[in-house]
Image (cartoon, rainbow, N blue to C red):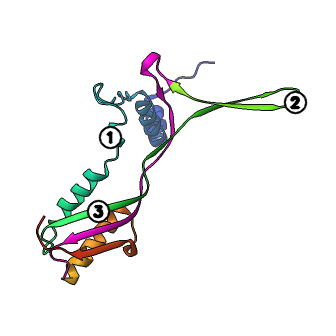
Amino acid sequence: MKVQWKPEQLWKLLDKYKYVLLALTAGVVLLLWPAGEKEKPAPDVPQDAAEDFDLAALEEKLSRTLSQVEGAGRVTVTLTLKSGMEQVPVTDRATSSGERENRTEEKTVVVGTGSDQEAVVRLRRYPVFQGALVVCEGADQAQVRLAMTQAVSALTGLGTDRITICKGTGQN
């Protein structure tokens, strides 16, 4: 038995399932959409260059930024660290059992060959600040001290009890 579709039946069927067909069409289009290439780091820049931590550069940048606060004047920032930058490598642990003893040997996992070997990093621990000292000309004004304390707290994660603001002379 052969089924013959009349145009009005076909239009009725399409009208009834138009949202289902629209969703299916959108799904197919999204599946076929090209994903594009992921950006690769520049070949001449080491991958860890962006993650190097320079305390002196951070202090200088904070000093320049805080000196722009109204009434602050010349600003100098000194930060102390509880712990520095640390990278924990991936290790491969091998355990061997003998008759009398069990031995465990750990080796750091590296990539590359020859002198171009690099350890695979499992975890990066960023520096933890211990305290901050801000010396500025405008520290005799309460609103300047408050702004300095809030800014240093926001940028370093230190509590306000770990930040000291002192009045400076304005001379280097």
Q: Quadrant of residue 163?
A: bottom left
- Mark 2: which amino acid? Arg
Q: Quadrant of residue 170?
A: bottom left
Q: Position of residue 155 (x, y in %)?
A: 32, 62
On whether residue 127 falls in the magenta region, the answer is yes
> Dot 3 surroundings within 10 Å: few (below 14), some, or many (20 or more)?
some
On whether residue 123 falls in the magenta region, the answer is yes
The residue that disc 2 covers is: 100
Q: Position of residue 84 (x, y in %)?
A: 42, 51
Q: Position of residue 154 (x, y in %)?
A: 33, 66
Q: Is residue 96 left or right of residue 53?
A: right
Question: Marks 2 and 1: in contact by CB < 8 Å?
Answer: no
| Magenta part of the chain | 111-140
Q: Split into 4 quadrants, where in the image is the C terminus?
A: bottom left
Q: Rounded to the nearest whole Å, what is the CA distance between mark 3 and mark 1?
A: 22 Å
Q: Is residue 104 left or right of residue 136?
A: right
Q: Quadrant of residue 11?
A: top left
Specify which label sits upstream in the sequence, 3 or 2.
Answer: 3
> Dot 2 surroundings within 10 Å: few (below 14), some, or many (20 or more)?
few
- Mark 1: which amino acid? Ala
The residue that disc 3 covers is: 78
Question: Marks 2 and 3: in contact by CB < 8 Å?
Answer: no
Label disc, if present, on residue 50 of the rendered structure: 1
